[in-house]
């Protein structure tokens, strides 16, 4: 299964608590931090919740 690289590009200050929790669940804590996750429906749903705070790119 393909992997995706998720990078936090904006701060979570002022965001709703569920968005802060979603970022933490994805493993993101600071701006500029990146994580690689499997491309599953669960991860894509989490990314969709915080889509304005992160960028996503596909990696091999």
Image (cartoon, grey):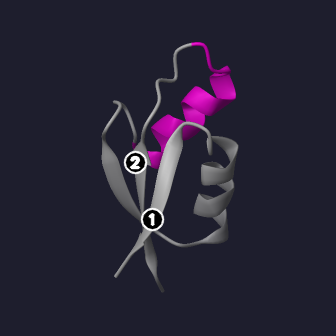
State the residue in front, 12 or 26.
12
State the residue in front, 16 or 25.
16
Give x and y (percent) for residue 38.
Answer: 47, 71
Direction top: furthest residue:
14
Give x and y (percent) for residue 13.
Answer: 52, 15
Q: Give the residue displayed 48% in from the left and 86% down from the top.
A: 1
Could you tell me if the residues under marks 1 and 2 are in contact, i.e. CB atoms within 8 Å? yes
Q: Which numbered tag is attached to residue 44?
A: none
Quarter residue 5 falls in: bottom left
Q: What residue is disc 2 on?
A: 7
State the residue in front, 18 or 50.
50
Q: Earlier in the sequence, mark 1 or mark 2?
A: 2
Vertical order, 37 against 14 (above or below) = below
Dot 1, how many residues are within 10 Å of its Cα: few (below 14), some (14-19), or many (20+)?
few
Q: Quadrant of the C terminus?
A: bottom left
Give x and y (percent) for residue 16.
Answer: 68, 21
Q: Which residues are magenta?
A: 14-27
Left or right of 53? Residue 16 is right
Q: What residue is disc 1 on?
A: 57
Dot 2, how many residues are within 10 Å of its Cα: few (below 14), some (14-19), or many (20+)?
some
Instruction: Find numbered disc 1 in the image and state the secondary structure of the residue it sits on.
Output: strand
Instruction: Find numbered disc 2 in the image and state the secondary structure of the residue it sits on.
Output: strand
Q: Give the residue displayed 46% in from the left and 24% down from the top.
A: 11
Vertical order, 50 against 2 (above or below) = above
Q: Give the residue displayed 61% in from the left and 39% down from the top.
A: 52
Q: Give the residue displayed 54% in from the left and 36% down from the top.
A: 53
Vertical order, 31 against 44 (above or below) = above
Specify whether residue 51 is painted magenta: no
Task: Kindly report the secondary structure that dominates the magenta region of the rendered protein.
Answer: helix
**Count of residue discs:** 2
């Amino acid at each position: 299964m393909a992997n995706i690289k998720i990078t936090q590009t904006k701060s979570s200050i002022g965001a709703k608590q569920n968005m802060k929790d979603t970022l933490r669940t994805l493993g993101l804590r600071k701006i500029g931090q990146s994580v690689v996750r499997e491309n599953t429906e669960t991860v894509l749903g989490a990314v969709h919740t915080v889509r304005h705070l992160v960028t996503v790119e596909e990696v091999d």
